[in-house]
Amino acid sequence: MSEAQAESFGHLGLPERLAEHVSALGYEAPTPIQAAAVPAMLGGADLLCQAATGTGKTAAFALPMIAAIAEGDLRGDTPVGLVLAPTRELCVQVSEAVHRYGRPFGIRTLPVYGGQPIGRQIFALKRGADIVVATPGRLLDLVRHNAVHLDAVRTLVLDEADRMLDIGFLPDLQRILSYLPKQRQ
Ligand code: AMP
């Protein structure tokens, strides 16, 4: 992508309404990670991205996920997008950002993490979620409780994957992957 093309969200291939919404949030131009990742992710590629904290990586993965839900006929009873994050703080932060970006489309985003009563999360999942943002251990607990089904997930994001591996989440991640469809991004 040329620099001129990357200068506006409208040129990244996002639905017009989503690009307009992002501009209305005050984002004048995509950051470099957004300019690189959004078109590739919209094209269906599997990506490994590295960008420093505060460079806009949440929107880089959230906007294509929202675009897929907004444009497609993906919404159902179970989540189509799954974001895994190492900590409760990151879960909440990502979930709030996804909610903000997806607001015009009514995207239902739900954070689930350890340290909060699981019953409340089970109840919230029953009401339906399009994108779940989870810590790995709590997500597996919820799968065991039959509270969440991952067989409709189209896109999986491992946010701060390096940190999750450092913490020792690899076995949990492998188990979660085994519950996802083979065809997924
Ligand atoms: P993140 O790296 O995703 O945590 O984002 C860091 C901060 O940058 C957040 O406050 C975002 O709201 C903001 N942000 C993300 N993308 C852009 C953008 N294209 N233009 C301006 N601010 C942005």
Image: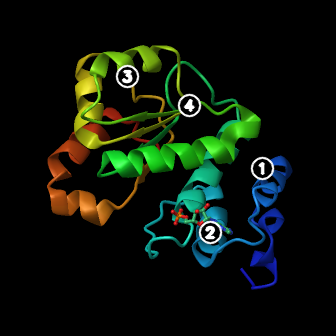
Q: Position of residue 161 (x, y in %)?
A: 32, 60
Q: Secondary structure at mark 4?
A: loop
Q: Which mark is residue 18?
A: 1
Q: Which mark is residue 130?
A: 4
Q: Earlier in the sequence, mark 4 or mark 3?
A: 3
Quarter of the image for residue 25 reads bottom right
Callout 1 crowding tier (Cα within 10 Å): few <14, some 14–19, many ≥20: many
Report the residue at 81% width, 83% height from top: 4
Question: Ligand 1 is located in which of the four quadrants?
Answer: bottom right
Q: Amino acid at mark 1?
A: Leu
Task: Report, in whole angstroms, how far the alpha carbon at label 3 lies from the one at label 2.
Answer: 31 Å
Q: Position of residue 29 (x, y in %)?
A: 75, 72
Q: Does residue 3 appear left or right of residue 54 in this picture?
A: right
Point out the residue furthest to the bottom here.
3
Residue for badge 2:
34
Q: Amino acid at mark 4?
A: Asp
Task: Report, in whole angstroms, how far the alpha carbon at label 4 lies from the one at label 2.
Answer: 22 Å
Q: Is 112 or 132 nearer to us in this picture?
A: 112
Q: Does residue 107 appear left or right of residue 93 in this picture?
A: right
Task: Report, in whole angstroms, how far the alpha carbon at label 4 lies from the one at label 1.
Answer: 17 Å
Callout 3 crowding tier (Cα within 10 Å): few <14, some 14–19, many ≥20: some
